[in-house]
Amino acid sequence: MCGIVGGTSERNILPILVEGLRRLEYRGYDSAGVAFKKNGSISVTKNKGRVDELAKKLNLKANQSNLGIAHTRWATHGIPSEKNAHPHHSKNIFVVHNGIIENHIDLKAQLKAEGIRFTTQTDTEVIAHLIRMFIEKGQSFEKAVFNSLKKLKGAYALGIINKNDPEQIIGARYQSPLVLGKGFQENFIASDVMALAPVTN
Ligand code: GLU
């Protein structure tokens, strides 16, 4: 079970996310990734391997963002690979997850029957598709997350963003840790207080 860092701030969030991931490295991981708001869209960068390599790929000098979620993965379902690295997405919904969704096989079968195509081997991908499905049925972002959580069995800490609701991060947890960090004009989530020590107490 590895790490999540997310935040929304008036200042550039990307160096904060990368530093947060570095501070979670002690928990062990095989890959890392980040999704961040950029020019009205969501940009995703993933990497199999070290956070330092992810940071290089992210090009911190050229990129700026005020909202993002980041993840270090310790694979439980699906090989360690760039494709299986988080964040996972379904259309406009982007999700990072620590934990295990025990009923993912049943949920996957139900979603496939509704015409959803899966692109990774992870248990996590079902969460993104569930939220999208509820939104497409007319529910608000919050309500869609809430109803998706009701379908999950297992353990989770989640950070979720929506391209169509670009000011908001939703965090949720059950049996996996997730802390909220409040700052001035900025707020954070993380799976461990250590990740947020430089930005809030
Ligand atoms: N079960 C998820 C996966 O295999 C999350 C693992 C984790 O906690 O990093 O991708």
Image: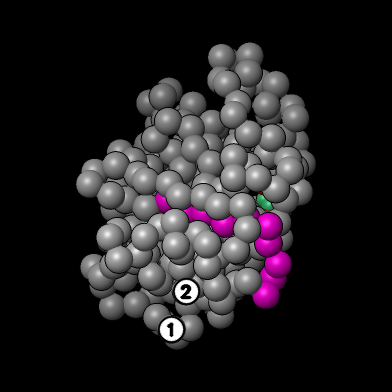
Q: Secondary structure at mark 1?
A: loop
| Closer to the camera in the image, 135 or 90 | 90
Q: Quadrant of the C terminus?
A: bottom left
Calculate the distance from the C-alpha at mark 2 to the C-alpha at mark 1: 9 Å
For the record, the magenta segment spans 26-35
Residue that appears at 60% across and 26% down: 118
* Residue 46 in magenta stretch: no
Residue that appears at 29% across and 42% down: 41
Q: How many numbered callouts?
A: 2
Q: Badge 1: how crowded within 10 Å, few (<14), some, or many (20+)?
A: few
Left/right of residue 33 with respect to residue 9 in the rendered view: right
Q: Amino acid at mark 2?
A: Glu
| Closer to the camera in the image, 156 or 59 | 59
Q: Quadrant of the N terminus?
A: bottom right
For mark 2, what is the residue?
19
Residue that appears at 44% across and 56% down: 57
Q: Tell me, yes or no, whether the two marked residues, 2 and 1, touch with CB atoms within 8 Å.
A: yes
User: Label 2 CB, ligand 1: below 8 Å?
Assistant: no
Quadrant of the image occupied by residue 198: bottom left
Give the x, y percent position of residue 106: 74, 27
Task: Check the image and report above or below for 191 versus 184.
Answer: above
Q: Amino acid at mark 1?
A: Pro
* Residue 27 in magenta stretch: yes
Give the x, y percent position of residue 44: 43, 46
For mark 1, what is the residue?
198
**Residue 103 marker:** none
